[in-house]
Image (cartoon, grey):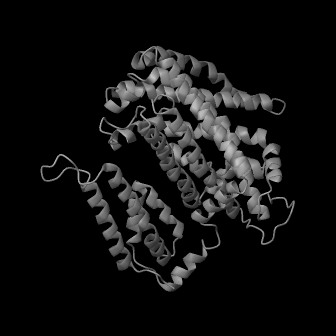
Amino acid sequence: MRRLGLFPWLGVWLVLSGLQLGAVAAMFPVGGSPEPLISPLLALAAIVVTQLLKWPVTAGRLRDLGRPTDDAVLLLVPIVSLGLTMSLLSGTPSEEKRKKALKKWESRTLAPAAVLKGLSALMAAPHVTLPALAIGGAAVYAIEALAMPWFRQATLRDKLVNGTLGPVQDGQLLIFQILLGVLAVLGIWLVLQLLNRKKASRASWLPTLAMLPVAIAAVAFWPRLAELVGPDQAPPGFFSASLTFGFWLFGGGLLSLLWVALGADLHQHGKVDVGRALGLWRSQLGGALAVHGATATVIFLGLQALVIPGLVYALMMAFTVHIAVLHPDLPPFKESSRLTRGWWRPVFNVLALGFVPGLVLQLLGVLLVDYVQFTAGFGSEFADDEGVYQVGRMLAGWATAQAMPGAVPLPPLGLAVGAVLAGLANGAAMAGLVWTYLDRRGQRPPKKAKENQPAKA
């Protein structure tokens, strides 16, 4: 039975969009007054709330069209949501066509349900999940605190935000980052070759020959880079950035494998047995950690190259860690590419439900700690002399922190708290992706818990 037609959906959509435009307009002074009608933070909160209110009516309209209701997740991504809006304006199909379309996706686990199942898997073992997140937060704090003394004055962040770093210099910085990324990939390849040296062919060693030329090229860019950001600030900044990237590869890998193991245990047995999940985690740790490192490095390189390639790689390689943990006999990259072909939308929906809330929680963590420090009489990164938070400055500093870890003087404790909150959101998505992955393989959760039942290949 249909729940919503085109015009009811369109009416609600226009009203909510009008409220959002009103919130944007209220952020600016009117009538000669130097003050805006509402504070920027309140306006931003109103925009977010009205965007979330679009979710139920969008899901109803999607069902009218016979499309998966979890495509409403696209509302969280501003540019992509424009394409979703255009598709929702299309004509409603006949009931027969609609039912036929519904049958194609109703059997799979939708993204919100998958993420909630992933979160329940994490929360079923709080004595494992919370300490793991706390250790990760402590590592972030240590890395950021290490760089803090060097970045309280003029920094690369200031040059990027203020626009004083020219396009040529910015291009040189990009080339240096790409060279470091390529060097990291070749390093991981060399480690994998050494571990598999008895079976490795001679031709498979050829990529390792490029390590020396790439390293020389990176060193050649170093004096110019030090000139751009200051000779005293470049070494600690990139040392901190390298520590952050290393933690992402190895610390993030340990956490990702743990989330997959907990999710798989809940999927297979209906409840989480911590000992059993940790046993799976330990048994596949070596190979799966290498797969995660290679996946993360390739995605990182793609994000450096105009962002879009990184998003494509993230979708193509979404199942590599799950394959390495649950089906270690299969080639993870080839199999993930095969399974995600034609399945990008369900994968994107799950990842977006972890990534977007994770970014918001990370930002809230920084703000929460900064506000507590400010009210306690300490300095603030984002408040002026009157205690008013500057949203533009806040978002600029936070966005640059994503692009250049370690080179931004944001509060280390705030970044650590934000990392823990974001880690919980991303962990729920990583565990929830177990349901998406096994749905794709045609493996539904057993109706009754069965102990020690191996996963099908």
Relative vertical location of residue 140 with respect to residue 309 in this rendering, above or below:
above
Count of marks, rendered view? 0
In this view, which residue lies farthest toward the front? 376
Residue at 62% x, 18% y: name it: 212
Residue 347 point in image, percent of width and height? 58, 57
Nearest to the observer: residue 280 or residue 200: 280
Task: Give the quarter of the figure containing the C terminus.
Answer: bottom right
In this view, which residue lies farthest toward the left? 32
Residue 63 point in image, percent of width and height? 50, 75
Image quadrant in which you'd find residue 241? top right
Nearest to the observer: residue 132 or residue 245: 132
Residue 351 point in image, percent of width and height? 57, 54
Residue at 56% x, 22% y: name it: 239
Residue 379 point in image, percent of width and height? 41, 31
Residue at 74% x, 42% y: name it: 288
Q: Position of 362 compared to 451: left or right?
A: left
Confirm whether residue 204 shows in the render.
yes
Relative vertical location of residue 378 with respect to residue 426 in this rendering, above or below:
above
Nearest to the observer: residue 354 or residue 144: 144
Nearest to the observer: residue 103 or residue 357: 357
Relative vertical location of residue 325 with respect to residue 212 in this rendering, above or below:
below
Confirm whether residue 180 shows in the render.
no
Relative vertical location of residue 343 with respect to residue 108 in this rendering, above or below:
above
